[in-house]
Image (cartoon, rainbow, N blue to C red):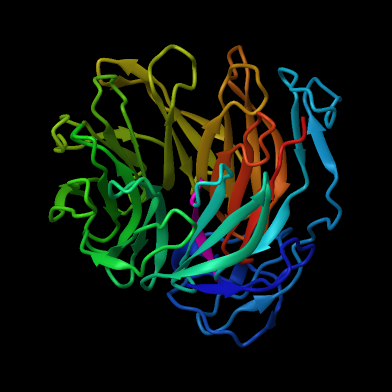
């Protein structure tokens, strides 16, 4: 493990080029100066950043430098019915967040998760950095405050990360997905924020995302890995000691990008859902409760889904799905209808090129809100849940750095409201947006 130095809170920061499908083509970027730093991977042939966004060159041999235009002053922003932000009182309906803080991490972070890694009661942050082939660990020093960044070496193309208990020692462990070296990596935690060297495990062709979950109800963690090129999910059953059975693969739709696990039908068995960017669909694999999965069922969504989340969005007690659809600039809301059935998807416009979506109640009104990471506009958007025929309103965009690819929600500062954590691949930062009720 190595340590990274540098400013934790930045107003302007280096625009380091991301890899693979995470940067737009050079024809749609603005001019920027080359730093001569090498990157890895090929550049996606797809739509680019908006003209209003400063962008990096997409030459695979170079990275670039420029300004995001982020405000260096951390002031409170608010919208919604309340103007009492900052008084410490959570009022239903108010949406109150501070301006983002930026923390330097490894090159081109593509995924992020939040957990207490060192058993001190504070939530820490872990990223997967596709450009530098490692994970950045940000240990909290106080609620919502973070110290020196530690890096954990991974395989090439480190795109996904998950945290859970892989063995029975009570300490949280990490699993990373490494596309270019074609394995998932297991890291065993010591309970103090340190981790073992990686243990590579085979799981499909170019694994992209990973989840830790108990699929067979034996009390031991299992692993589900999504592999893009083989278009499948691999299930690796654990015995509770950190040892896993060989992967068993289940086919999903073409070019799967996103993965989540949830009990959609309330039968006590976790189900697996993938977002299939190559088709405009989700694959649902119903869990059998014994560690096996049923054959996939396809559910239509809008074009280019890159991420999927599961939550009861309409409050009827049935878990729903929502997909971030990159090509259409929308999120597709797919309401569960019970009996393993789903309603037709409803598209909701968000910022350009939404790459990820998560759900939580951000304003204490007992309705789930949505947060998306919008790659082209370098923003996260909050879609506030509301009653009536239009279930969501676009409430508040935050600039979080070039090419945001993932977002997580957790109460970092312990004020009772979820905070927003986003990773910006083009800027190589974590953007932390703290609530300010």
Q: Where does residue 129 sit, x and y in percent of width and height?
A: 49, 66
Q: Classify residue 316 as left or right of residue 205.
A: right
- For image coordinates 51% across by 56% down, the residue present is 126
Q: Where does residue 208 sit, x and y in percent of width and height?
A: 35, 58
Q: Quadrant of the C terminus?
A: top right
Residue 143 image-quadrant placement: top right
| 390 is within the stretch colored magenta | no
Q: Classify residue 374 as left or right of residue 324.
A: right
- For image coordinates 60% across by 12% down, the residue present is 388
- For image coordinates 60% across by 79% down, the residue present is 63
- Magenta span dominant secondary structure: strand
Please tell me whether residue 430 is drawn above or below residue 382 in the rendered image. Answer: below
- For image coordinates 37% across by 66% down, the residue present is 196
Please tell me whether residue 296 is drawn above or below residue 250 in the rendered image. Answer: above
Q: Would residue 352 be visible to someone looking at this image?
A: no
| 111 is within the stretch colored magenta | yes
The boundaries of the magenta stretch are: 107-117
Residue 297 image-quadrant placement: top left
Q: Where does residue 305 sit, x and y in percent of width and height?
A: 42, 45
Q: Nearer the viewer, residue 213 or 17?
A: 213
Q: Nearer the viewer, residue 390 or 292?
A: 292
Q: Would residue 14 be visible to someone looking at this image?
A: yes
Q: Where does residue 159 sit, x and y in percent of width and height?
A: 42, 61
Q: Nearer the viewer, residue 243 or 331?
A: 243
Q: Nearer the viewer, residue 116 or 212?
A: 116
Please tell me whether residue 412 is drawn above or below residue 56 in the rendered image. Answer: above
């Amino acid at each position: 493990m190595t340590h990274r130095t540098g400013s934790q809170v930045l107003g302007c920061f280096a625009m380091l080029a991301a890899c693979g499908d995470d940067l737009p083509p050079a024809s749609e970027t603005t001019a920027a100066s080359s730093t001569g730093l090498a990157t890895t991977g090929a550049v996606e042939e797809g739509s680019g950043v908006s003209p209003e966004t400063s962008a990096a060159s997409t030459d695979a041999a170079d990275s670039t430098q420029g300004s995001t235009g982020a405000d260096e002053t951390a002031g409170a922003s608010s919208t919604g019915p309340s103007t009492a932000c900052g008084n410490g009182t959570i009022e239903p309906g108010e949406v109150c967040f501070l301006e983002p803080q930026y923390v330097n991490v490894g090159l081109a972070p593509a995924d992020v998760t939040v957990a207490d890694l060192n058993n001190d009661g504070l939530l820490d942050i872990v990223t997967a950095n596709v450009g530098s082939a490692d994970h950045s660990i940000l240990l909290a020093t106080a609620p919502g405050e973070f110290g020196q960044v530690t890096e954990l070496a991974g395989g090439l193309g480190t795109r996904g990360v998950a945290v859970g208990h892989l063995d029975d020692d009570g300490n949280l462990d990490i699993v990373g997905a490494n596309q270019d070296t074609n394995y998932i990596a297991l890291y065993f935690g010591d309970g103090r924020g340190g981790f073992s060297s990686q243990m590579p495990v085979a799981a499909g062709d170019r694994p992209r995302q990973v989840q830790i979950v108990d699929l067979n109800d034996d009390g031991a963690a299992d692993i589900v890995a999504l592999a893009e090129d083989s278009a499948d999910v691999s299930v690796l059953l654990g015995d509770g000691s950190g040892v896993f059975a060989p992967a068993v693969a289940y086919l999903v739709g073409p070019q799967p990008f996103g993965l989540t696990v949830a009990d959609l039908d309330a039968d006590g068995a976790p189900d697996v859902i993938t977002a299939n960017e190559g088709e405009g669909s989700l694959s649902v694999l119903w869990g059998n409760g014994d560690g096996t999965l049923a054959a996939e069922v396809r559910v239509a969504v809008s074009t280019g889904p890159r991420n999927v989340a599961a939550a009861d969005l309409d409050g009827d007690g049935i878990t729903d799905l929502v997909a971030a659809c990159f090509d259409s600039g929308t999120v597709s809301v797919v309401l569960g209808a019970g009996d393993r059935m789903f309603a037709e998807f409803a598209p909701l416009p968000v910022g350009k090129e939404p790459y990820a979506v998560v759900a939580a109640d951000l304003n204490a009104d007992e309705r789930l809100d949505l947060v998306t990471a919008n790659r082209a506009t370098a923003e996260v958007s909050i879609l506030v849940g509301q009653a009536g025929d239009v279930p969501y309103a676009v409430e508040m965009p935050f600039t979080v750095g070039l090419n945001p690819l993932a977002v997580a929600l957790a109460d970092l500062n312990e004020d009772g409201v979820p905070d927003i954590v986003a990773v910006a691949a083009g800027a190589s930062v974590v953007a932390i947006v703290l609530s300010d009720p």
